């Protein structure tokens, strides 16, 4: 990345390509797959809105991905054999890879959230993807070029989201997934989600978060509870105990208006994932209702 990048925008130094396929992607993408599958069970159209879409597809052999090799301790530790209940998730990942690279240890590519959404979109559905980083935006445009129903904008996703609500279809899945590199993004993200909900209260909203400092996530939870929004659930996966020194130790999502199938599904899945992905088999998880009906 050029040394000029930070002059473009302070938020643009983060590159998801270093972290593609890691444990945080696994938990976020399993939730996305489950919700998208649920939405496609009815013929009615829906709209997918992604506020921080990234490049859309990640080459695991690239210099970025190879630098940290985070996919090795993420999706690399999962297999269709050990996790038959994740068959749909593996189908999506396989669809982004050439036929010869379909075992988890031979993956060439890992899908970002836009590629996962694109896999499920039908002719009646639409997607709106926002990405500010110029290189990632360029890559996203290329990755999504073959999809007629997907609109890609080089724009601030927090603002772009508000302009798209309420959606024409009256059904939507919104993913709010910033890097949180700048601390103010925690406040921005929660504010964007609450504001969006007030504009369109029946949409499904997914807010992804990293646990780097637990106090920040406690703040998000408190603000959500205070907002008065009902039907909020949390699904979190931890690979090591909370710590202020160790970087991201856990990651999760808050989901508003979660499909009725999701809670049971994650309740049975998270203990298994914590064991498979946790350091030394000692992971942790949270699966709870933040705010009921």
Image: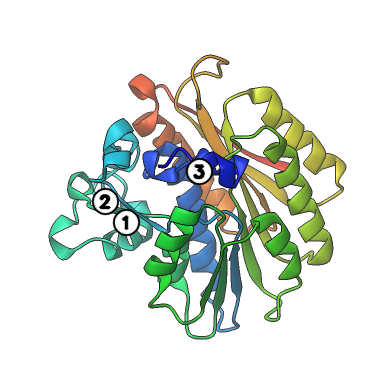
Residue 236 seen in the figure: no
Few, some or many residues within 10 Å of mark 1 (<14, 14–19, 20+): many
Local secondary structure at mark 2 = loop
Q: Please name the residue that numbered disc 1 is placed on.
A: 90
The span from disc 3 to disc 1 (Cα, nearest Å) is 35 Å
Q: Residue furthest left?
A: 100
Camera-near label (1 vs 2) is: 1
Dot 2 or dot 3, earlier in sequence: 3
Camera-near label (3 vs 1) is: 3
Dot 3 or dot 1, earlier in sequence: 3
Q: Please name the residue that numbered disc 2 is placed on.
A: 80
Name the residue: 61% across, 40% down: 10
Relative to the observer, which residue lies in front, 208 or 155? 155
Classify 93 as above or below 286: below
Q: Quadrant of residue 164?
A: bottom right
Q: Are marks 1 and 2 in contact (CB under 8 Å)?
A: yes
Relative to the observer, which residue lies in front, 204 or 192? 192
Q: Please name the residue that numbered disc 3 is placed on.
A: 5
The span from disc 2 to disc 3 (Cα, nearest Å) is 40 Å
Name the residue: 58% across, 15% down: 244
């Amino acid at each position: 990345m050029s040394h000029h990048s930070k002059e473009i925008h302070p938020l643009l130094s983060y590159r998801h390509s270093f972290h593609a396929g890691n444990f945080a992607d696994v938990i976020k993408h399993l939730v996305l797959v489950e919700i998208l599958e649920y939405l496609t069970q009815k013929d009615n159209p829906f709209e997918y809105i992604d506020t921080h879409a990234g490049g859309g597809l990640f080459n695991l052999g690239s210099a970025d991905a190879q630098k940290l090799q985070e996919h090795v301790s993420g999706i690399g530790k999962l297999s269709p054999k050990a996790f038959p209940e994740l068959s749909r998730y593996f189908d999506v990942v396989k669809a982004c890879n050439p036929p010869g690279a379909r075992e988890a240890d031979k993956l060439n590519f890992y899908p970002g959230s836009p590629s996962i959404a694109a896999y499920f979109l039908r002719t009646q559905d639409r997607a709106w993807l926002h990405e500010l980083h110029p290189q990632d935006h360029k890559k996203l445009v290329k990755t999504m070029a073959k999809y007629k129903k997907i609109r890609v904008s080089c724009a601030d996703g927090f603002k772009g989201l508000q302009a798209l609500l309420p959606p024409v279809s009256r059904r939507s899945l919104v993913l709010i997934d910033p890097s949180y590199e700048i601390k103010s993004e925690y406040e921005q993200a929660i504010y964007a989600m609450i504001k969006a909900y007030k504009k369109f209260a029946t949409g499904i909203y997914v807010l992804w978060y990293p646990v780097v400092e637990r106090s920040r996530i406690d703040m998000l939870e408190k603000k959500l509870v205070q907002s008065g929004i009902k039907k909020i659930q949390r699904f979190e996966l931890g690979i090591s105990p909370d710590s202020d020194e160790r970087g991201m130790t856990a990651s999760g999502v808050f989901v508003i208006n979660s499909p009725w199938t999701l809670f049971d599904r994650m309740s049975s899945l998270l203990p298994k994932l914590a064991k498979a992905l946790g350091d030394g088999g000692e992971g942790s998880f949270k699966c709870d209702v933040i705010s009921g009906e």
